Amino acid sequence: MSERPLIVGWKGLKHMGWPYSRAHTWRLMDAGVFPLAVKLGAHRNSHPMWRVKSVLSYFEAHGLTVTDDWYASA
């Protein structure tokens, strides 16, 4: 039984089918268009993570498709 993760990092976001670069993703987050990233650690260099539920709802709202192999690898 495979369950989807609750959070996803940059590589997972790209594996889901996110077509944009890191810089454009941060621009979209600053504009309030894309869901904000959450840092799990207090250190400034800790990796940004996104909630899968909010990313999937963004994909649905904007007509982006999630790759089928992402569901299998979760």
Image: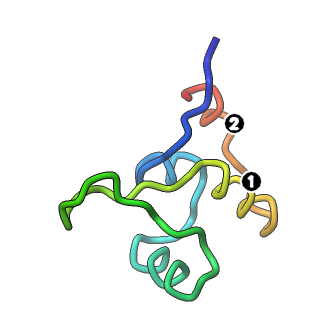
Q: Regarding mark 1 in the picture, which secondary structure is present there?
A: loop
Where 71 falls versus 33 (above or below)?
above
**How far across and how far down the image is residue 21, in percent?**
45, 71
In the visual, does 18 lie left or right of 11?
A: right
Name the residue tied to disc 1.
Answer: 65
Residue at 80 percent across and 59 percent down: it is 60
**How far across and how far down the image is residue 17, in percent?**
60, 53
Residue at 55 percent across and 27 percent down: it is 73
| Residue at the extreme front | 42
Label placed on residue 68: 2
Q: Of the residues shown, which amino acid type is indicated by label 2?
A: Asp
In the visual, does 47 lie left or right of 28?
A: left
**How far across and how far down the image is residue 25, in percent?**
49, 74
- The part of the image, by quadrant, that contains residue 47 is bottom left
| Residue at the extreme bottom | 31
Label placed on residue 7: none
Q: Regarding mark 2 in the picture, which secondary structure is present there?
A: helix
Q: Of the residues shown, which amino acid type is indicated by label 1?
A: Thr
For the residue carrying disc 2, how many other residues have a C-alpha within 10 Å: few (<14), some (14-19), or many (20+)?
few
Q: Nearer the viewer, residue 12 or 57?
A: 57
Where 9 falls versus 19 (above or below)?
above
Quadrant into which the N terminus falls: top right
